[in-house]
Image (spheres, helix red, strand yellow):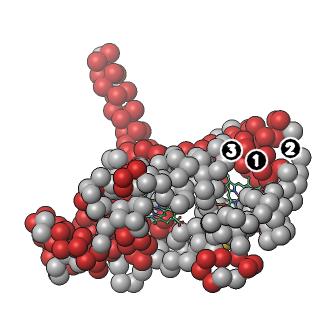
Amino acid sequence: MSKLFAFLAATIILGFLILRCSSGQDFNASLAVPTPIDNPQSLAKIALGRQLFFDKRLSIDGTIACASCHDPQKAFTDQLSKSRGIKGQLSERNAPSLLNAAFLKTAMFDAHLASLELQAIVPIQEPVEMGHNMKLLLQQLRQIPEYQAAAQRIFQRDFDAYVLTRSLAAFERSLLSMNAPFDRYIAGDQKAMNHDQIAGWKLFSEKLYCTQCHPAPYFTTHVAANNGLYASYEGKTDLGRFRIHHDSSDIGKFKIPSLRNIPLTFPYMHDGSIQSLDQVLAHYQKGGAKNPQQDPRITPFVLSPNEKKQLLAFFDALIDTSYLKRDRF
Ligand code: HEC
Ligand code: HEC
């Protein structure tokens, strides 16, 4: 009798666990992921993109893969102020997370690249990142029977830039992290966030002005803005979006980053110059460093120690690492 009872209890618990896991999966599967008309998602394409993403042969000396700087275990960042490319070279900027890249309207801190397909060749050819030459790389990849066969099977063509960029982009579009405690709270589960997290969300969205640039659900408006990181950009080599059109009003403008998984994607800002979320809040509290092009929405405010604690608790409610298990990283 007691055996039967134990068996029944185990079945119920197991059933419950399976239901929970699959509801998480369904949640992500039911998200409408924007995909370009000429690159529909397919499991085979995502699998090829995944292999390429982890393949160090994409760098000239075989030492660096996309994943070296966008590590799944670190929310697809490297948790360094500035990334390390081939031969230990320092890249110019901080590596952003690729989670939810499917929803990006533009890629890069300059908010200038229109698609993930276009973005993919940049790090490959960037001398301090992967330092390769596309012509040479494609010749090499075509010699690898597994890649050539996959290109024929999925795209009905030889392995070329089309295959490389579309597979990488398809893989990136599969990286979803949109089922954080915050999402479950918004969907009606009052218990998904604790008291401090709810208070922090109220501060973030009602008392302060953060959602003007970091609104739910993506916590970015996808445009570039100047959040007053420095008092002056004189002598700085990285002027942000200015480098695209040489328009002086763009000096110090960088693409507004999403705040999803933000406690995991330290250090912060385009140059990784702010180490902690505590220091990020201090930056906004003083109203930025006040440069001439600073966005007028950034103004000083006062936070009590308890309010600061609540905001930091809210940031924790933006963490969703279920992709690690779901996608087996
Ligand atoms: C050496 C480190 C490094 C490597 C290797 C690397 N990246 Fe990045 N990645 C970065 C940095 C730094 C940025 C920010 C660059 C900028 O904004 O100018 C970035 C930006 C991106 C972005 C834009 C994200 C956004 O929010 O705008 C995407 C997409 C991306 N990388 C994908 C890839 C892919 C795909 C590969 C492999 C082909 C790759 N990266 C290889 C460091 C790296
Ligand atoms: C005018 C638009 C704007 C407003 C308002 C704004 N931010 Fe930002 N935020 C930005 C930009 C732009 C960056 C990136 C700057 C850079 O890379 O140098 C950023 C970066 C951040 C980062 C670091 C993200 C990362 O991955 O590096 C955090 C955290 C952050 N903001 C939180 C807040 C909070 C909290 C508020 C409200 C007090 C706020 N922001 C208000 C534009 C804004």
Disc 3 or 2, which lies upstream in sequence? 3
Judged from this view, the residue extending furthest toward the front is 235
Label 3 vs label 1: CA separation? 6 Å
Image quadrant containing the N terminus? top left
On whether ligand 2 comes within 8 Å of the CB at mark 1, the answer is yes
On whether ligand 2 comes within 8 Å of the CB at mark 3, the answer is yes
| Element carrying mark 3 | helix
Q: Give coordinates of residue 242: x percent, y percent.
A: 65, 76
Q: Nearer the viewer, mark 2 or mark 1?
A: 1
Residue at x 73%, y 65% (from the top left corner):
233
Identify the mark at residue 11; answer none if there is no mark: none
Determine contact: label 2, label 1, CB under 8 Å.
yes
98, above or below 14, in the image: below
Residue bearing the label numbered 1: 281
Determine contact: label 3, label 1, CB under 8 Å.
yes
Packing grade of label 2 (10 A; few <14, some 14-19, many >=20) is: some
Residue bearing the label numbered 3: 277
Q: Give coordinates of residue 135: x percent, y percent.
A: 25, 77
| Element carrying mark 2 | loop
In the rendered view, does 307 fall on the left or right side of 183?
Answer: right
Packing grade of label 1 (10 A; few <14, some 14-19, many >=20) is: some
| Element carrying mark 1 | helix
Residue at x 83%, y 35% (from the top left corner):
305
Residue at x 83%, y 70% (from the top left corner):
292
Residue at x 37%, y 70% (from the top left corner):
125
Q: Nearer the viewer, mark 3 or mark 2?
A: 3
Residue bearing the label numbered 2: 303
